[in-house]
Amino acid sequence: IALGARGNELCQANIGDFDVATGVLQLTDKKGKSKKPRIRPVHCKPYDRPETNIYPRLVARVRKARLACPPGQDADELPLFTRNGARWASANLSQTVRHLVQKKAGLPHVVPYSFRDYRITALLNQGMPTFAVAKFAGTAEQHIRNCYDQSTDEMLGNLIEAAYAKSG
């Protein structure tokens, strides 16, 4: 979700969608209107803390799945993200993220989709062109212009302060 991906895309991702060598995750919304894959770099950044860097965990997951795959079954078709051995469901993922953010982190007014919004806004603030952000997000350039082009770090800070003020 912090990659700017939709929850249902992550839930539908398979082992074969992640390239261990390049650290690229190709996400396709198999239920949505666009079947075009979106590329997500998941490589390690020098400032990533070990507990928040998902790259080594994805590499380990892919390697483990390929080694444990029974004969006759294609490891590339196995789910990339699992819980108790089964593919994550989008509703379960949203519920879990909501619980972690709202209850454990004490941010009751933040919803899981906020992470996608944050990623899009951060890319715009870093100077990425609107068309590139739209391609990254898998949405129309006009949608980015309408919803995010006016977003600034100051505006996000004000929203976060307001959320904290509401939560008491």
Image (cartoon, grey):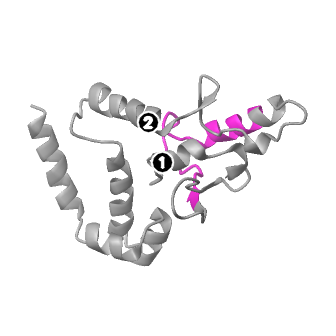
Question: Could you tell me the amino acid type at mark 1?
Answer: Tyr
The numbered mark at residue 91 is: 2
| Residue highlighted by disc 1 | 47
Quadrant for the C terminus in the image: top left
The answer to which image quadrant residue 66 occupies is top right
Position of residue 102 relative to residue 10, above or below, is above
Q: What stretch is highlighted in magenta?
A: 39-64
* Element type at mark 2: helix
Other residues around mark 1 within 10 Å, as few (<14) / some (14–19) / many (≥20) = few
**Where residue 105 appears, x then y in whole percent?**
29, 30
Distance between the Cα atoms at labels 2 and 1? 31 Å
Q: Give the mark toward the camera: 2 or 1.
A: 2
Report the front residue among 158 and 76. Answer: 76
Residue 58: in magenta span: yes
Query: Going from the N terminus, do you reach mark 2 or mark 1 first?
Result: 1
Position of residue 141 relative to residue 31, above or below, is below
